[in-house]
Amino acid sequence: MIPVILSGGSGTRLWPLSRGQYPKQFLPLVSDHTMVQETLLRLAGIVGLKAPIAVCNEDHRFMMAEQLWEIGAKPAAIILEPVGKNTAPAVALAALTAESPDDVLLVLPADHVISNIKAFHKAIAEAEILADQGFLVTFGIVPTEPETGYGYIKRDNLQQGAAFHVAAFVEKPDFETATQYLQTGDYFWNSGMFAFKAGSFLKELEKFNPKMLSVCEKALKAAKVDLDFVRLDKEIFSSAPSDSIDYAVMEKTDKAVVIPLKAGWNDVGSWSALWDVTDKDRLGNAISGDVLTVDTENSFIYAENKLVAVIGVHDLVVVETKDAVMIASKDRVQEVKQIVTQLKELKRSEADIHRKAYRPWGHYDSVDTGDRHQTKRIVVKPGAKLSLQKHHHRAEHWVVVKGTALVTKGDEKILLSENESIYIPIGTVHCLENPGVIALEIVEVQSGSYLGEDDIVRFDDKYGRI
């Protein structure tokens, strides 16, 4: 069995913590591990698992690779989507990448929480048996309330081992309809998790959407392999139809079965959902960071950078990051995505990036910005190296705070230690790298007429960036 990790979501409803360039699946929301890491770690103990295949946005490739590396997971491939095309093409790519058409793919979104691991493993074992018989298995979450934020799966009365044949997939219902679904006992929440043989899925996809399969085959054939990364041809892959597994295959096939799953599942699709799965104090408050409360109940309060004091509030979500504060009524958190839409319309960077921005070589934090200056705290991982580059509009002054820096400045190579500094004039080709075994920390002061991140001319980059 091959775990297939789908990591294409943007997590806009968890803004300002989750953002376009650093979405929720790469955040440690419910434990010390990120959600991507938890997705794989909860499979520990299952016998016969092969190396995982991950499918993610090209912009997230280094986060995916590093987070898998941190937990000792060696992927068979990390397939990079140059454009998002929903789940069906992503799974098709994984199926085409599998070693054998008889390999069972365990398709898992990277942003779920499952608390009852024993029940989950039992369902996976049952799914593998059915997948080996040629069925396309989905996991239906036994509903606990009339939820209107999920799609539903209606079961048939015909049973197949531990599963039921699927009668229908239905869209997100209104509250009254969801209540009726709950009363019948025939409906499950659609988890978006699947198990099937690679060959079985591709055969059904060819039957119902041959163009999608053809485009995925061509995109893979033209792909470039770079270490663990499979870089798809953008022009070819962009022509693929965009569709979910449900619409493309599962709704049409006569081989779909659903296994009822009762395992403490949550897709953490909103701040209220995160409140549900987070430990709370005696007043029902889920608190993270430097927080003080007075007469506050049933609230989610997250402080990343500052002291947050909350007085006399109930059922609120308060989230503070270095560059944003979001306050919402807990029953209206689905509307957070409207704020993200406004930010994008205003072309504000807060929609996509944090003040602290992650790069393959480390990260930087923009601690102060003015009309003609910007100050950053830059951390470079041991052995890492920024691209060889120059800027047309800004000069840079670097001061080493910790570690050792090897600086390329024009034709010179200069080694700097703590408390030493260097000046890089406008237009000078330069590079910063960390030759040491501890993290390199520097303070960078930029000055000039334009300080945007797009004022970079790269001549060489070990990470393959343009």
Image: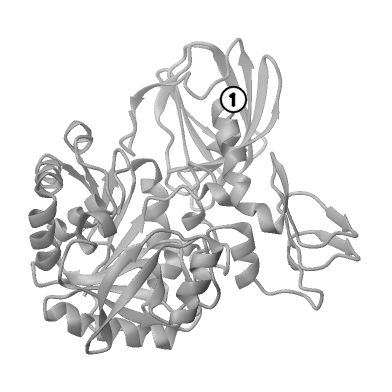
Task: Look at 19% across and 53% down and name the residue there.
Answer: 93
**Residue depicted at x 39% and y 41%:** 59
SS under mark 1: loop
Q: Which residue is depicted at the point 24% across and 62% down? A: 251
Query: Mark 1 highlights which residue?
Result: 346
* Colour convention: one colour
Q: Which of the two residues, 50 or 440, is positioned nearer the viewer here?
A: 50
Query: As drawn, is 457 to the left or to the right of 323?
Result: left
Does residue 17 appear in this view? Answer: no
- Side (left or right) of 169 relative to 182: left
Task: Report whether 374 appears left or right of 432.
Answer: right
Report crowding for label 1: few under 14, some 14 to 19, many 20 or more residues within 10 A (C-alpha): few
Q: Type of residue at label 1?
A: Leu
Decide which of 278, 299 is in the foreground and name it: 299
Q: Is residue 128 above or below residue 266?
A: below
Q: Position of residue 215 (x, y in %)?
A: 13, 42
At x 41%, y 68%, the residue is 39
Given residues 310 and 364, the one toward you in this image is: 310
State which quadrant residue 104 falls in.
bottom left
Q: Quadrant of the C terminus?
A: top left
How far across and down, in percent of the image, does residue 367 sit?
Answer: 69, 34
Classify 308 as above or below 427: below
Where does the image place residue 89, in percent across and percent down from the top left?
Answer: 22, 50
Q: Position of residue 11 (x, y in %)?
A: 50, 50
Residue 3 can be seen in this image: yes
Q: Quadrant of residue 94?
A: bottom left
Q: Quadrant of the N terminus?
A: bottom left
User: Disc count in the image?
Assistant: 1
